[in-house]
């Protein structure tokens, strides 16, 4: 078996490692355009900001250690130029010597990844404009920052946000421009708003719903011109406006591509040519929640797809198919962590998928144990069969654990009923006897079953709003137009509420207001509780 692998980082290195574990006799060659293989691209922002101090820690393997460890031929600084499918050969070029070589394969794996998009705008060729993909990009940014006071990050996706945080850690004044009216488009707007607040609290100069039009040199610095006419000064610019699949090799070889140019693959990562496999950012993968195919440029899918490739090559029918991706991702922005799995509300609306949603605020662990933090957690599910469609969370602590549990639930095609009885870790420092995931399941079932009538915002006056928090809380943080009836007094003060009009109950986080609404509903009131309470709506 002569196995050629194009790309030696996430997908390619995973395919090579698994291939060797399945076959000691295969001839495996990894062809990598850059000087490094198997490096930690996800760690690059954290070296720039100083969280990671040793550059060597990012080079998980050197070309020679990888070669020795797995008995591979590792060709760095070597580019795959073209595929000849009828001869089953790959033409490669040594980028240092210029020498080209034709290499025969039995199976070819394409794991070329995706390159940062470079919009065609005036000034983007200035020397202090950077993208971040490789260790060399990182080194250049790191060096240039030594002489910078300010930076502009263009694009508020995962990498843009990580860079904004890390540049701030490094003492740089940061501006961030995002085309959409919110940061991190996979998150629903109300969650993205919390991230925007976290950024602004650290003096990140955020420009949402804005776009960069041009850059011009201004002495050693630059002036950035935005669409609105705003001008920003920046000593350095990071462009993080998305990635484009490196699918030219596949396109030239007339392999089937998806709508946006990603390589189309089946459940075993085979392209339209069964002897050519593909994995990682260059492919479009099955969307296992909503169906169809979509790109998902994330490290986890790339690594697992690489493994699937090797499994199918060496184990054939015994290989586990890649089940598609659900889109689980996480980002830290200063003290806030936001995570998402599955479909968000915007995506469900765009695709015309019927859904119901509920948001709860719950404690990361027992309130009485020090250090408990609020997690805002949203579930989206199908009204047809109560199957989970997606979840999002934001908070300071415990967000990763809840979204990981919900990602597992999504993969297991669980319903909101299943979430109610997930038996999760509990001791006071770690969780609650009813974990936030259980509580979200209860709230979802209550909503579906008609016990919870949600209001997603404080209604305009003159609606009847009853604030059921303790009076001291009400006085310190009043809700405009609300009357305060603390929950323990509610049953004895029902006569103060007009039964002919709808009533909206509110509390701090949205739980006590639900209890109040249940009291009112059972006494004949048309009562609705305001989701997320004062924490979310004020
Ligand atoms: P890559 O890892 O990019 O590897 C592709 C390799 O192929 C490249 O080294 C390239 O040089 C080589 N290549 C391309 N064309 C050729 C050719 N013709 N010949 C030879 N070699 C070629 N994902 C997460 O899930 N979580 C994170 O926190 C996260 N953070 C990230 C931070 C940064 C700064 C970046 C850049 C990415 C981050 N990602 C993260 C995304 C993750 O790194 C990618 O999804 C993953 O690396 C994709 O793997 P891949 O093998 O498809 O491509």
Image (cartoon, helix red, strand yellow):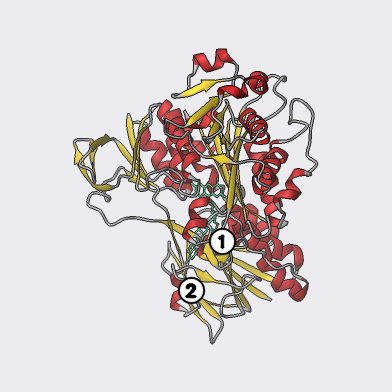
Residue at the extreme bottom: 86
Name the N-terminal-most of marks 1 and 2. Answer: 2
Q: Quadrant of residue 103?
A: bottom right
Residue at left offset 67%, top offset 64%: 323
Q: Is residue 78 above or below residue 423?
A: below
Spot occupied by residue 94 in the image (x, y as percentages of width and height): 46, 66
Q: Which residue does the numbered mark 2 point to in the structure image?
A: 257
Compared to residue 275, the image places residue 35 above or below, namely: above
Element on which disc 1 rests? helix
Image position, residue 163 (x, y; %)? 44, 39
Label 1 near ligand 1 (CB < 8 Å):
yes
Question: Residue placed at 45% from the left, 46% from the top?
Answer: 157
Seen in the picture, residue 345 relative to 452 is either above or below; the reply is below
Q: Residue at x 52, y 57 (%)?
A: 348
Q: Is there CB contact under 8 Å for labels 1 and 2?
A: no
* Relative side of 513 to 368, left or right: left
Q: Position of residue 218 (x, y in %)?
A: 19, 37
Give left or right: position of 21 versus 352: right
């Amino acid at each position: 078996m002569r196995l050629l692998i194009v790309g030696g980082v996430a997908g390619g290195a995973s395919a090579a490692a698994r291939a060797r574990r399945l076959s000691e006799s295969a001839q495996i060659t990894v062809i990598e355009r850059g000087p490094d293989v198997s490096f930690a691209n996800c760690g690059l922002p954290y070296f720039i900001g100083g969280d990671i101090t040793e550059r060597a820690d990012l080079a998980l393997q050197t070309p020679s250690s990888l070669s020795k460890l797995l008995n591979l031929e590792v060709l760095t600084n070597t580019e795959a130029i073209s595929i000849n499918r009828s001869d089953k050969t790959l033409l490669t070029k040594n980028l240092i010597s210029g020498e080209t070589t034709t290499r025969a394969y039995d199976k070819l794996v394409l794991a070329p990844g995706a390159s940062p998009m470079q919009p065609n705008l005036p000034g983007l060729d200035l020397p202090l404009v950077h993208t971040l993909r490789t260790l060399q990009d990182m080194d250049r940014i790191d060096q240039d920052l030594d002489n910078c006071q300010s930076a502009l990050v263009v694009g508020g996706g995962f990498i843009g946000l990580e860079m904004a945080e890390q540049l701030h850690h490094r003492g740089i004044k940061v501006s961030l421009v995002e085309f959409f009216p919110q940061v991190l488009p996979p998150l629903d707007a109300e969650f993205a708003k919390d991230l925007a607040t976290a950024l602004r609290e650290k003096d990140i100069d955020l420009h949402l719903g804005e776009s960069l039009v041009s850059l011009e040199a201004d002495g050693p610095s630059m002036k950035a011109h935005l669409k609105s006419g705003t001008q920003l000064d920046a000593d350095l610019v990071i462009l993080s406006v998305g990635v484009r699949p490196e699918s030219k090799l596949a396109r030239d070889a007339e392999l089937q591509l998806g709508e946006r140019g990603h390589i189309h693959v089946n459940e075993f990562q085979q392209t339209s040519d069964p002897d050519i496999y593909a994995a990682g950012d260059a492919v479009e993968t099955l969307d296992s929640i909503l169906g169809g195919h979509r790109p998902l440029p994330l490290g986890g899918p790339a690594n697992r797809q690489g493994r699937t490739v090797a499994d199918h090559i060496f184990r054939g029918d015994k290989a586990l198919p890649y089940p598609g991706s659900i889109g689980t991702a996480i980002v830290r922005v200063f003290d806030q962590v936001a995570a998402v799995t599955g479909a968000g509300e915007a995506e469900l609306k765009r695709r015309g998928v019927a859904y119901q949603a509920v948001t709860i605020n719950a404690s990361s662990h027992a309130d009485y144990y020090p250090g408990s933090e609020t997690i805002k957690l949203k579930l989206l599910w199908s009204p047809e069969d109560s199957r989970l469609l997606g979840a999002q969370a934001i908070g300071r602590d415990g967000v990763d654990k809840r979204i990981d549990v919900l990602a597992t639930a999504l993969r297991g095609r669980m319903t909101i009923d299943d979430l109610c009885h997930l038996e999760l870790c509990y001791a006071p420092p770690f969780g609650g006897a009813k974990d936030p995931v259980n509580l979200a399941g209860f709230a979802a079932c209550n909503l579906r079953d008609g016990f919870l009538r949600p209001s997603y915002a404080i209604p305009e006056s003159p609606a009847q709003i009853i604030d059921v928090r303790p009076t001291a809380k009400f006085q310190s943080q009043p809700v405009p137009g609300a009357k305060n009836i603390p929950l323990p007094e509610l049953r004895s003060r029902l006569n103060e509420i007009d039964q002919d009009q709808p009533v909206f109950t509110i509390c701090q986080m949205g739980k006590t207001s639900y209890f109040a609404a249940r009291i009112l509903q059972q006494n004949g009131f048309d009562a609705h509780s305001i989701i997320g309470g004062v924490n979310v709506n004020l």
